[in-house]
């Protein structure tokens, strides 16, 4: 950008030099590169010694002796600018850049104000456009991964459907146990309530992450987990129209099912044969319609003498030759593709700036799920007068998502039993039926020709049964700012967002879903042959429409005043927000779209169903989505006082209220505050470190709260309609706990910022203390019965951590080499819990993927049964009272003794990494730039998936270690996989799964992405082309090193890691 | 100018905040409510998912002697479930029959508390109905729990025998304490009697309590206590309100044919109060258990119950005759057939043999093949009549959740019913009056005030 600007100035100068002139007045304005007017800039002309400084609004006027002349613009902290003045007409606008040694050239956007990084005492990270475009994909949040200190992504921990952990993103670890874990997401000025997918990544200029209490406290009660502020691109005043074009495509490989560590097909077949011998399948076989795996059908035919021994062997061999996984990879998986196109036009005159941007995305995933999206963005700012400015932004998103093929687990199963030897297509690729829901022998004969075909054909089903979601999202905001006085500005901001989602789920008459429903409600009179179809033959259409509306209104006063040695920046305001949702649902049977028709149905009376004769009501659409209204009211104030540009004090306070349900009025309001101190040591006289010209120390303290709006103190009943009796009913879904209070999190942060010519960075140390945290508390469930715990303010926790960011310029010659190193250390532990028994580490015998508070232990952690060895019969052994034991129930119930004997259960460690970080190396050589991001996670454990015999007997997928199980005496010396015993003992399986031999270190180093750009000089002689760049990127490259020697990816212990993606594209601007 | 601006701004902001409390009064979700009105309380009690379906204990039925498991079926169960079958349960935790049955108790208590804040004059009829329903549900589940977890009632020891926890408030901070069997049954009877006074004769839907249901519950409770005259009285009172029996030979409430896989409609005319057995820790899945062959042998060839209730698979019989209209659930509610059996048995015991025989004939006639008549029985004495009626009781109330209670009460009068199971050649036995007939409480609710049963 700077280069372009220099070229621009050069052209200007060249043009001007052609027409010399006499003594003239020159006026203009000086702005920083982020459009902030710069005051106090020294301006001197080369001729006649004329000098001046800019006023508070950045303007200046001076009279030159003669033209041409050259003006020098200088100020501490900014790169000097020299401008040749040739013509008197133009009002100059000069942009000055901060010096390179500044920490960052981007401003910190808190959503309430934009400030220079060095004016902030709080802890924040900024991810600028350069880093954002190094990763590709359609979700903007994913691009923060491994490029942001203090931010951790925990794959497998987040869940889009959960209320508390939608993103799986943590800023600085945890501040709560059962409260929300998601950071607050802010788009420009307001909390973003829409779907994050609707934000167009190419529209984003930068992202600021507010990490500590002082930075986040302005956002109040919902900022306890930090704030992510997304800032969109804006145009500039006095900018020539610029067109930018970006296109790219991404290809993701097919997932590799062989990473599932599954048992061999032969092992499954042996197991099924064994179970058949034990008559395990009899209850299913007795109910003639319940399907059994194909092998069982063969064995049954052989047993009843329907086929010969030779036929049986041939048929079994034929089944063994089939492979569900290979077939699935061939017929279901496709490489995923994404195409992104975006175009933006922006420009500005002296009092108007505008931007129009559009983007089109087309995505197809591995299972042919399609997602197409169009984004439009209009932005327009007008200076109506010197005092009054308006800023209008409109974003519109339209998307369409179409469902794809069914998952492997859905397809490769027979009546819920995983079957690895199915065939989904014949040799010519024609789809084949799979007996997933009904037994072939039943559906072949049941209807005697009166029913629709009742077979399930997975390769056809997804084409005939499709869910289409149309989303329209419009977000518009307006800001009106009025400068009452040069130092005092008032502004009013309003935003309206509306997202309409229309889901159409159609099961075509040919789909199994429709055929099955129709057949179930068909009655055949055997004697007359009369057929009654209570559900008519036709498509079944289910629709759900949801509408989300949010409105924000904010009034704000900004006061900025500078005296000789002091400066004050004051901000105060109030805000109200309303979020509303409503919707409706419908179902149409016998639906036909051409010509449009459907059948009237009776949803009141029961009809007999075909298979068992059981009477059932035909399913209606059910209750529509609830109408919800959430309201928030807040008042906030923020003050920053600086003295001699050396010392600064900041204070922030906020008062929040909401209409949380069932909450007593005085609990609706929560005050929160924070304070901070900053000290620019490098500006002190005694400071003498020549090699480190910039050094700042800052410290903050603040409180933030957490309120879970679903936790109420009064008994709340949820209304619905009784599925059995069709009358209105209510249910108590949470036990009322009148003693519930707000959670409080206090955070201290001490940070150091430094930079010199080749190195810059920051180090932050923080401590978080959470009190009155919500947690599950076991109680006497005789009181309620529906759950064995209730939510109460049960726990305190404490967390400490270090965030380090280092940027270095290692080489700056022909070969450029920059390194960004990020290191995060997080450690947390429960410091108080509701009672003594919670100190038992036995509760940590779980997957480690949910928070389990045990005093003195990390919130996410695991314990394990101390493993001894297999005994002579292949049973896993542990320790009970220091002795070898196979009494699994007793070991599970045991408490660690203080007698020095080997305990039954030992604490293993944290199950989320304590140390994480990444190393981004960027090499520039001629026109090429190569970035390599290597990330690492250290200091944690995970459970290795192991064989569960009760699982495989019941029909779950097994584990390949089944082949290594104990089979005959002596094997205990070679293997640690227990013998297969029948009947199965779930407690024995659990002992083995949760024993120390299956708790592995999760430490690993991963090559996250490689990004290559090529920026040709000269742009092929096309003058209009300002910027031209080609890029190629490879992501999810793979693991470079791991601590476990089982080849398991600890982020994906159950297999199926995110496949590699490749992307390439062009960025150009005119 | 300067000052005016500040004042205007601050004034505007403060004025805005004053109105905020009102702004925050709006209800956030139209499906939510803090139950306060009679309509809310009715909606809570009408919730069949919480109050009726899969709620009554199955631990007792699974410990009973109406069924058996083949060795293969036994082996296909997890070790924990096998212990239920062999009467060796020691420790088990949430979720279980105890927790499942106490949920309707909580709702009943919540409704009774909220009801105190509503003046009855608001709508006396509905108010009575809500109170009656809440009392009935509490009484009904207390009675189910005491049958499962406490010893049989014995007037001599009932004040010392451990009963169940009588929770009568919704506040979970109130500690639980085990009452005696005497106190438990007094509470059951007291609540049921008050409910009978308040409730309408017959319900709008069988999932809702009624006077007939409360009488039925009282008859059942007095029967379990062996107060046969009282049991007679209440069975009789209930039958005066409803005495419809399905005709197994031809009836609107029978699906196509009595031999079909699901012969009876849900909410058939015999159903007075509808409840289903819980399916947690499920040993007695209808598709895996086999019917005791002695029961099968005891049916007359013209008795339609043999084909209505059972289906033959190879050599064994499986049960299919539930009043739930569903192949997976057992009906445990109060029905007319059970009331006939109670009245008949109690009539025989108190010496009204004629009534006993006529009730039995009425019931059997409805179960019989149209072309034949049930055999006319002339018992020599009251004792013989009782034995005969008890046999019919077992044949009629198969898997209805009453067998465990019957074994316990009958052993109290010396019928010496010992249970025996054979698994892979090993014989397990549960002797008459064994302390295990009061089944163990879940380990995670046992405390100083809620002691475990002693074995």
Image (tube, coloured by chain):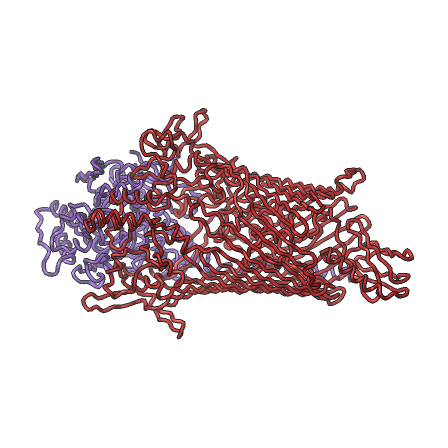
Chain colours: A red, B purple
* Residue closest to the far bottom: A595
Q: Which is more toward the observer, A908 or A2?
A: A2
Can residue A216 be seen here? The reply is no
Can residue A805 be seen here? The reply is yes
Q: Position of residue B76 (x, y in %)?
A: 28, 42
* Residue closest to the far front: A1020
Q: Which is more toward the observer, B11 or A386?
A: A386
Q: Position of residue A76 (x, y in %)?
A: 80, 49
Question: Would residue B121 appear left or right of A100 to someone viewing this image?
Answer: left
Question: Would residue B257 appear left or right of A96 to someone viewing this image?
Answer: left
Question: Would residue B135 appear left or right of A816 to someone viewing this image?
Answer: left
Q: Quadrant of residue A15?
A: bottom right
Q: How many marks?
A: 0
Q: Residue drawn at (48%, 60%), measured in percent from left and top? A: A370
Q: Quadrant of the C terminus of chain A?
A: bottom right
Q: Is residue A717 above or below residue A528?
A: above
Q: Quadrant of the N terminus of chain A?
A: bottom right
Question: Would residue A598 appear left or right of A488 to someone viewing this image?
Answer: left
Q: Which is more toward the observer, B220 or B250?
A: B250
Q: Is residue A923 above or below residue A500?
A: above
Q: Position of residue A761 (x, y in %)?
A: 68, 43
Q: Is residue B203 above or below residue B90?
A: below
Q: Position of residue A462 (x, y in %)?
A: 40, 60
Q: Which is more toward the observer, A954 or A583?
A: A954
């Amino acid at each position: 950008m700077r280069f372009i600007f220099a070229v621009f100035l050069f052209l200007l100068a060249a043009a001007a030099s052609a027409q010399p002139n006499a003594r003239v007045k020159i006026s203009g304005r000086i702005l920083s590169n982020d459009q902030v007017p710069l005051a106090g800039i020294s301006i001197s002309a080369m001729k006649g010694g004329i000098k001046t400084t800019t006023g508070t609004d950045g303007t200046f006027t001076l009279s030159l002796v003669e033209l041409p002349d050259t003006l020098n613009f200088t100020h501490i902290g900014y790169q000097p600018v020299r401008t040749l003045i040739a013509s008197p007409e133009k009002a100059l606008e000069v942009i000055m850049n901060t010096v390179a040694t500044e920490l960052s050239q981007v401003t910190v956007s808190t959503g309430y104000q934009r400030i220079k990084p060095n004016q902030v005492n709080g802890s924040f990270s900024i991810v600028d456009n350069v880093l954002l475009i190094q990763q590709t994909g359609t979700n903007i949040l994913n691009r923060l991964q491994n490029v942001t200190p203090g931010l951790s992504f925990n794959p497998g921990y987040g869940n889009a459907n959960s209320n508390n952990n939608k993103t799986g993103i943590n800023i600085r670890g945890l501040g709560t146990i059962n409260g929300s874990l998601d950071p607050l997401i802010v788009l420009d000025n307001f909390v973003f309530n829409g779907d994050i997918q609707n934000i167009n990544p190419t529209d984003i200029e930068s992202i600021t992450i507010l990490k500590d209490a002082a930075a986040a406290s302005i956002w109040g009660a919902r900022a306890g987990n930090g704030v992510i502020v997304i800032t969109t691109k804006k145009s500039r005043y006095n900018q020539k129209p610029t067109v930018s074009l970006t296109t790219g495509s991404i290809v993701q490989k097919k997932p590799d099912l062989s990473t599932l560590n599954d048992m061999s097909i032969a092992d499954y077949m042996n197991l099924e044969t064994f179970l058949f011998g034990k008559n395990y399948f009899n209850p299913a076989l007795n109910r003639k319609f319940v399907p059994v795996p194909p092998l069982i059908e063969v064995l049954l035919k052989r047993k009843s003498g329907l086929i010969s021994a030779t036929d049986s062997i041939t048929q079994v061999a034929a089944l063994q030759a089939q492979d569900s996984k290979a077939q699935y990879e061939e017929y279901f998986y496709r490489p995923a593709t994404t195409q992104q196109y975006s175009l933006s036009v922006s420009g500005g005159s002296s009092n108007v700036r505008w931007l129009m941007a559009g983007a089109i995305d087309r995505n197809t995933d591995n299972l042919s799920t399609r997602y197409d999206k169009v984004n439009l963005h209009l932005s327009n700012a007008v200076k109506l007068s010197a005092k009054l400015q308006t800023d209008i932004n409109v974003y519109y998103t339209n998307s369409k998502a179409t469902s794809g093929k069914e998952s492997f687990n859905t397809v490769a199963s027979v009546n819920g039993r995983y079957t690895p030897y199915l065939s989904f297509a014949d040799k010519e690729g024609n789809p084949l039926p799979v007996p997933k829901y009904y037994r072939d022998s039943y559906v072949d004969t049941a209807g005697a020709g009166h029913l629709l075909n009742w077979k399930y054909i997975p390769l056809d089903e997804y084409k005939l049964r499709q869910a289409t979601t149309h989303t329209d999202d419009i977000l518009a905001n307006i800001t009106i700012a009025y400068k009452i006085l040069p130092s005092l500005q008032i502004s009013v901001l309003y935003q309206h967002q509306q997202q309409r989602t229309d889901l159409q789920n159609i099961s075509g008459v040919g789909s199994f879903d429709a055929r099955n429903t129709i057949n179930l409600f068909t009655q055949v009179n055997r004697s007359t042959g009369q057929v009654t179809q209570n559900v008519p033959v036709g498509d079944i259409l289910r629709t759900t429409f949801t509408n989300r509306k949010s409105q924000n209104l904010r009034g704000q006063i900004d006061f900025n005043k500078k005296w000789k040695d002091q400066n004050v920046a004051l901000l105060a305001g109030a805000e109200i927000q309303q979020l509303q949702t409503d919707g409706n649902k419908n179902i149409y049977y016998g639906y036909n779209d051409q010509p449009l028709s459907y059948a009237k149905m009776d949803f009141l009376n029961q009809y007999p169903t075909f298979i068992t004769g059981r009477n059932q009501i035909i399913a209606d659409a059910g209750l529509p989505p609830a109408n919800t209204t959430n309201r928030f009211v807040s008042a906030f104030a923020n003050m920053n006082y600086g003295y001699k540009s050396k010392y600064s004090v900041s204070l922030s306070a906020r008062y929040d209220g909401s209409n949380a349900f069932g909450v007593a009025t005085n609990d609706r309001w929560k005050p929160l505050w924070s304070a901070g101190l900053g000290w620019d040591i490098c500006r002190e006289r005694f400071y003498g470190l020549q090699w480190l010209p910039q050094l700042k120390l800052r410290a903050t303290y603040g409180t933030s709260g957490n309120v879970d709006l679903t936790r109420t103190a009064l008994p709340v009943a949820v209304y619905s309609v009784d599925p059995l009796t069709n009358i209105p009913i209510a249910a108590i879904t949470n036990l009322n706990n009148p003693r519930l209070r707000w959670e409080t999190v206090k955070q201290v942060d001490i940070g150091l910022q430094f930079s010199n010519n080749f190195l810059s960075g920051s180090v932050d140390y923080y401590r978080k203390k959470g009190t009155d945290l919500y947690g599950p508390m076991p109680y006497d469930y005789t009181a309620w019965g529906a759950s064995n715990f209730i939510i109460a303010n049960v726990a305190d926790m404490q967390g400490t951590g270090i965030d380090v960011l280092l940027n270095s310029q290692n080489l700056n010659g022909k070969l450029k080499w920059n390194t960004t190193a990020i290191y995060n250390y997080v450690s947390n532990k429960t410091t108080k819990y509701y009672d003594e028994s919670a100190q038992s580490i036995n509760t940590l015998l779980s997957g480690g993927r949910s928070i389990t508070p045990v005093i003195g232990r990390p919130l996410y952690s695991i314990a394990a049964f101390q493993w001894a060895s297999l005994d002579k019969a292949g049973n896993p052994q542990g320790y009970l009272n220091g002795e070898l034991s196979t009494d699994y129930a007793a070991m599970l119930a045991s408490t660690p003794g203080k007698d020095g004997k080997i305990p039954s259960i030992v604490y293993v460690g944290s199950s989320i990494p304590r140390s994480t970080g990444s190393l981004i190396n960027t090499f520039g050589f001629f026109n090429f730039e190569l970035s390599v991001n290597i990330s690492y996670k250290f200091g944690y454990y995970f459970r290795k998936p192991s064989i569960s015999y009760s699982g495989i007997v019941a029909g779950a997928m097994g584990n390949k270690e089944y082949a290594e199980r104990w089979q005959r005496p002596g094997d205990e010396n070679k293997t640690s996989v227990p013998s297969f015993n029948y009947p199965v003992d779930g407690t024995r399986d659990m002992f083995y799964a949760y024993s120390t031999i299956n708790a592995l270190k999760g430490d690993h180093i991963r090559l996250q992405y490689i990004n290559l750009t090529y920026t040709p000089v000269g742009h092929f002689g096309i003058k209009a082309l300002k910027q031209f760049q080609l890029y190629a990127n490879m992501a999810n490259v793979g693991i470079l090193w791991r601590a476990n020697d089982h080849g398991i990816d600890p982020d994906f212990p159950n297999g199926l890691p995110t496949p590699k993606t490749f992307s390439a594209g062009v960025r150009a601007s005119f | 100018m300067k000052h005016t601006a500040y004042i205007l701004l601050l004034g505007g902001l403060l004025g805005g905040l004053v109105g905020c409390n009102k702004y925050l009064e709006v209800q956030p979700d139209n499906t939510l409510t803090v139950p306060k009105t009679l309509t809310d309380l009715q909606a809570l009690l009408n919730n069949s998912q919480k109050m009726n379906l899969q709620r009554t204990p199955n631990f007792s039925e699974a410990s009973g002697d109406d069924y058996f498991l083949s060795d293969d079926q036994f082996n296909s169960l997890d070790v924990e479930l096998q212990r239920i079958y062999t009467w060796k349960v020691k420790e088990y935790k949430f979720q279980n029959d105890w927790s499942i049955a106490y949920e309707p108790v909580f709702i009943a208590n919540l409704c009774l508390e909220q009801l105190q804040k509503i003046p009855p004059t608001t709508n006396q009829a509905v108010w009575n109905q809500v109170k009656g329903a809440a009392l009935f549900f509490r009484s009904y589940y207390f009675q189910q729990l005491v049958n499962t977890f406490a010893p049989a009632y014995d007037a001599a020891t009932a004040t010392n025998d451990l009963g169940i926890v009588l929770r009568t408030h919704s506040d979970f901070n109130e500690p639980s304490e085990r009452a005696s069997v005497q106190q438990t049954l007094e509470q059951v009877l007291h609540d049921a009697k008050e409910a009978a006074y308040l409730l309408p004769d017959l319900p709008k839907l069988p999932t809702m309590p009624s006077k007939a249901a409360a009488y039925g519950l009282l008859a059942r409770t007095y029967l379990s206590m062996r107060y046969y005259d009282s049991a007679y009285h209440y069975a009789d009172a209930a039958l005066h309100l409803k005495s419809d029996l399905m005709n197994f030979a031809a009836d609107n409430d029978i699906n196509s044919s009595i031999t079909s896989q699901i012969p009876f409609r849900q909410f058939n005319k015999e159903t007075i109060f509808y409840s289903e057995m819980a399916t947690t820790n499920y040993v007695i899945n209808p598709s895996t258990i086999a019917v005791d062959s002695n029961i099968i042998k005891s049916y007359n060839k013209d008795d339609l119950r043999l084909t209505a209730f059972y289906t033959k698979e190879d050599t064994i019989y499986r049960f299919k005759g539930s009043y739930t209209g569903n192949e997976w659930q057992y009906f445990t509610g109060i029905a007319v057939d059970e009331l006939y059996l109670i009245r008949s048995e109690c009539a025989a015991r108190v010496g009204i043999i004629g009534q006993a025989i006529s009730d039995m004939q009425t019931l059997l006639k409805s179960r019989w093949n149209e072309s034949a008549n049930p055999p006319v029985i002339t018992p020599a004495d009251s004792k013989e009549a009782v034995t005969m009626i008890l046999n019919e009781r077992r044949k009629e109330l198969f898997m209805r959740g009453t067998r465990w209670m019957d074994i316990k009460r009958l052993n109290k009068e010396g019928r010496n019913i010992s249970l025996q199971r054979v698994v892979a050649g090993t014989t397990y036995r549960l002797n008459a009056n064994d302390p295990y007939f009061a089944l163990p409480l879940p380990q995670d609710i046992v405390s100083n005030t809620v002691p475990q049963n002693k074995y």
